Image (spheres, helix red, strand yellow):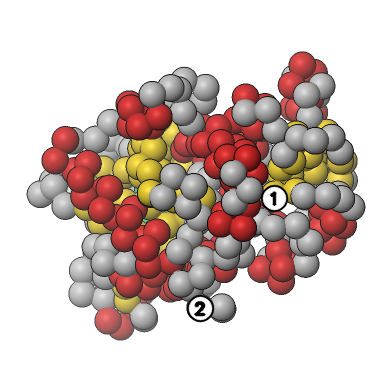
Amino acid sequence: MGSKVVIATTSSHSSFYNIIPGAIEEGLEVYVVCFDRDWELWSQYPDLLNQINIIRVKDYSDSKATVKAFNSLDGDVVIVPHGSFVRYLSVIELKQLKHPILGGVKILGYEGNRNLNSELLVASGINTPKVFSDGEAIDRSVMVKLHGAEGGKGYFIANNKADFQKKSKGMNIDFIQEYISGVSVYAHYFSSPIEKRCELLGFDRRIESNANSQYLVSTEEPSFTVIGNVPIVVRESLVPEYHRMGRNFADQTGLVGPFCIETIVTNDPKIYAFEFSGRIVAGTTVWVPYGNTYANNLWGESMYMGKRIAREIKRAYEKKKIDLIMVDSPKLEEI
Ligand code: AMP
C-alpha cells in the first residue's frame, strides 16, 4: 500500500456507485472484496476498476472468506460498512475484523434488532409508532414485519386484531408496529467529530411495489418491497425538526459517521420515525455525484454521502485525529 489513506468495503450498489466514487474523488486508496455475484456487473466498468484494488471472494454468504480477505490487508485501513455488508456479516464476525469499522459495531447490532432499534429512537426523544409486543394487544391498524424480511418484502398491514389473527397464521412474525399513514421520508445524516456537528445531508423517499406506485385500486394487498429511491426536498416547516432528530440521535449514541432516520409524515403533518440505519443507506446514492440542496448549502460544493465519508476520514488523518472518528458509539451499551 502507498502513502494514501486506505478504505475497504465489500461489493454492493452503495459501495460501487457511492462509497467508491466518493473515495476516488477525495484521493483515497480503495480495496474492495468483490463477490462473484457482482463481478459480471462490475466488469462492465473497466475505467473505475482500474482505480481500485479488488479481492475476489466467490460467495457473499461465505463470511469466513470475507473476514479473511479484510484481515489480509496490512497497514491503516478503515472499513466502511453498508446495507449488505451488515446483512452478510454477523456482529460476532464484525468483531473479528482487525481494522476499525467507521461507525463501530455496536450501532449495527442495535440496527439489526427491531426492538432495540425502536427503543433507541424513543430514548433519543424521537416520535415513533407504538410497538405491540403481541397480537392480543392490537387496538389499531398495524404494520407486521416478518423475521428475515428485508426492504419491506413480506410486510403486511392488519386493520385490527381479528385481521391480524387471520393474516398471521403460519407467519414468522418478528415485530408489530402501529401503521402510520402518510409519506415516507428518509433523512440522511453524518455525525462528524472533525467538524463537531451532526449534518443533515438530504432526504430521499422510496418507491415501493406496489404501495406507492401502481397501487391505485383495492384489488390486491399493498406490498412494501422497496424497488428504488427518489430525491425529495421536504416541506419547509419540517426541516428544523429533522435537524433536531439527527442531533438527538447522535447525542444519545455518540455515533460517528453516516446514519438514516426512516420516517412517515402524516397529514398533520407529524413525523413518526419507524426505524434507523446506523450506516450509509441506498437512498443517499440518488445524490451522486452532484449533491443536493441541503448538503451543498452546508459545504459550498457538491457533497454526497460517499464523498462525505471519504472527506471525514481524510481530514481525520490530515489532522492526526483518527482516534476521534474510530469510536464505537461510546454512549451505547454493548449488546
Ligand atoms: P423497512 O424495510 O422497515 O424500512 O420498511 C419498508 C417500508 O415499509 C417503508 O419504506 C414504509 O413504506 C413501510 N413501513 C415500515 N414501517 C411502517 C409503519 N410503521 N407504518 C407505515 N409504513 C411502514
Q: Is residue 78 above or below residue 214?
A: below
* Residue found at x 80% / y 18%: 46
On the rendered image, what quadrant is the C terminus found in? bottom right
Earlier in the chain: of badge 2 and badge 1, it is 1
Picture coordinates of residue 325, whole percent (x, y): 57, 54
Taking the image as drawn, is residue 279 in sight?
yes
Extreme residue in the left direction:
268
> Residue 186's quadrant in the figure?
top left
Near mark 1 (Cα within 10 A), the count class, few <14, some 14-19 or many ≥20, is many
Element assignment for label 2:
loop
Q: Amino acid at mark 2?
A: Glu
Taking the image as drawn, is residue 153 in sight?
no
Tell whether 111 sits left or right of 92: left
Q: How many marks?
A: 2
* Residue found at x 65% / y 44%: 317
Picture coordinates of residue 90, whole percent (x, y): 68, 66
| Residue 248 or residue 144, whichever sits in front | 248
Tell whether 333 sits left or right of 84: left
Tag of residue 187: none
Q: Amino acid at mark 1?
A: Ile
Extreme residue in the front direction:
319
Q: Which residue is mark 1?
A: 79
| Residue 2 or residue 149, whichever sits in front | 2
Tell whether 257 sits left or right of 322: left
Q: Which residue is mark 2?
A: 333
> Residue 109's quadrant in the figure?
bottom right
Q: Is residue 242 above or below residue 133?
A: above
Picture coordinates of residue 175, whole percent (x, y): 42, 70
- Spatial distance from mark 2 to mark 1, Cα to Cα? 22 Å
* Residue found at x 78% / y 39%: 31
Picture coordinates of residue 134, whole percent (x, y): 36, 81
